[in-house]
Image: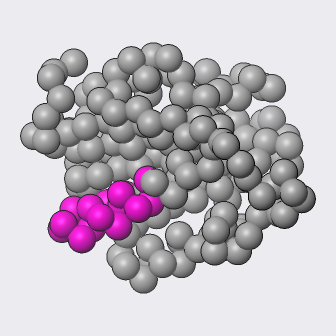
Amino acid sequence: MDKPSKERGLTLVYTGDGKGKTTAALGLAVRAVGRGFKVLVIQFIKSPQRTYGEKIVFDKLGIEIHQKGIGFTWLKTPEEHREALRSAWSFAKERIFEGQHRLVILDEINNALAIESFPVDDVLPLEDVLRVIRERPQGMHLVLTGRGARPEIVEIADLVTEMKPVKHYYEEGIPAVMGIEM
């Protein structure tokens, strides 16, 4: 892969077990739009059946966001998730190679690639993800979020930030908070 440069486009990875991976990527989207970038966000796990704060505000700001998942793995069957992942990855590849966006965020793709409870490599092949990262249009920045970033993705990324939990209110029994997690 070429040496990192603004002209080539960068690959950024936000991973780890701590909170803030999607939040960091969405903040970057706002910054990029402020600088005139066209931004695309594709969420691999979140479902359009739920309302998330980022979807509400991004629609207002004109940031294109697509929720292609069906929720978290323990709520649906493996086949439902496999089909959603297949569809999301097909959509993501098509939109990336259209080359219409300067920044593309693949939110929670690392989570999807790390699923071990059912096979995903035939519907979301790691080698294909790596190929797309390498062959994306010149000047396009990619952000991949989610726990468990694969070593192969870490290896080719230009920036990897690992979110590490130190303290979290979940430990005190406080559930997801509107405006903070959703």
Q: Is residue 112 positioned above or below 130 on the image?
A: below
Residue at image coords 41%, 62%: 27
Q: Nearer the viewer, residue 49 or 146?
A: 146
- Can residue 131 be seen in this snapshot? no
Determine whether, in the image, residue 151 is placed left or right of residue 159: right
Q: Is residue 129 positioned above or below 177 on the image?
A: above
The quadrant in which the N terminus is found is: top left
Q: Is residue 29 magenta?
A: yes
Q: Residue furthest front?
A: 166
Q: Is residue 35 positioned above or below 142 on the image?
A: below
Q: Residue furthest bottom?
A: 60
Q: Is residue 80 magenta?
A: no
Q: Residue furthest right?
A: 173
Residue 182 placement (x, y as % from top left): 66, 67
Q: Is residue 146 positioned above or below 4 on the image?
A: below
Residue 149 placement (x, y as % from top left): 54, 28
Q: Residue 47 occupies which quadrant of the picture? A: bottom right
Determine whether, in the image, residue 17 is placed left or right of residue 116: left
Residue at image coords 65%, 56%: 46
Instruction: Name the main secondary structure of what is drawn in magenta.
Output: helix
- Can residue 81 be seen in this snapshot? yes
Q: Which residues are magenta?
A: 25-40
Q: Nearer the viewer, residue 13 or 128?
A: 13
Residue at image coords 39%, 43%: 143
Residue 174 placement (x, y as % from top left): 84, 63
Residue 32 placement (x, y as % from top left): 26, 61
Residue at image coords 20%, 39%: 9
Labels in figure, total: 0
Colour logic: one colour
